[in-house]
Image (spheres, rainbow, N blue to C red):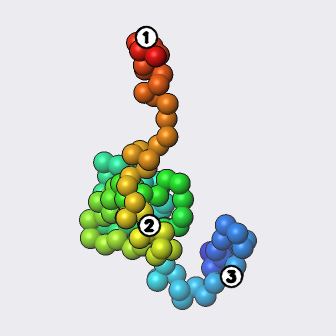
């Protein structure tokens, strides 16, 4: 708060905005970390942004959901969520030449 008792919030994309100081009691600090960094930890509430992405699959959603102790909130694209649940996990869809490289290395070409 400024000396004149204004509540000023610095929004990432919108810059500083003056808010009603009476709202201060309704505000809570929030923190964001990646699902990867959250592995092994738990939190009372987890908010999961869902959008079409190469890394979004059911294993990532499972990991994110299992971080929550009491509440999970999905925010975003329902179609992306359904696609992630329906499709096989990303590692099983990877196109690699590992078999070919191993065969060559073992002299089986």
Gap in Å between the C-alphas at discs 2 and 3? 41 Å
Where is residue 23 shown, x and y percent of the image? 53, 86
Please tell me which residue lies in front, 102 or 65: 102
Where is residue 91 shown, x and y percent of the image? 41, 44
> Disc 3 marks which residue?
18
Q: Is residue 83 visible?
A: yes
Which is more N-terminal, label 3 or label 1? 3
Camera-near label (1 vs 2) is 1
Where is residue 44 shown, x and y percent of the image? 31, 66
Q: Please determine whether, in this image, residue 43 is positioned above or below residue 100.
A: below
> Disc 1 marks which residue?
107
Camera-near label (2 vs 3) is 2
Q: Please determine whether, in this image, residue 98 is positioned above or below residue 68.
A: above
Classify 10 Å Cα crowding around label 1: few (below 14), some (14-19), many (20 and above): few
Where is residue 49 shown, x and y percent of the image? 49, 67
Q: Is residue 29 visible?
A: no
Which is more N-terminal, label 2 or label 1? 2
Please tell me which residue lies in front, 82 or 11: 82
- Residue occupying image coordinates x 41% and y 70%: 82
Please tell me which residue lies in front, 5 or 84: 84
């Amino acid at each position: 708060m400024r000396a004149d008792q204004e509540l000023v919030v610095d929004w990432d994309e919108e810059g500083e905005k003056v808010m009603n100081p009476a709202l201060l009691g309704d505000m809570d600090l929030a923190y964001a970390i990646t699902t990867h960094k959250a592995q092994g930890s738990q939190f009372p509430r987890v908010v999961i942004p869902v959008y079409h992405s190469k890394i979004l699959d059911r294993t990532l959603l499972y990991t994110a959901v299992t971080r929550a102790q009491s509440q999970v909130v999905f925010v975003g694209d329902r179609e992306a969520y359904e696609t992630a649940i329906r499709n096989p996990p990303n590692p099983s869809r990877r196109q690699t030449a590992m078999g070919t490289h191993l065969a060559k290395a073992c002299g089986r070409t």
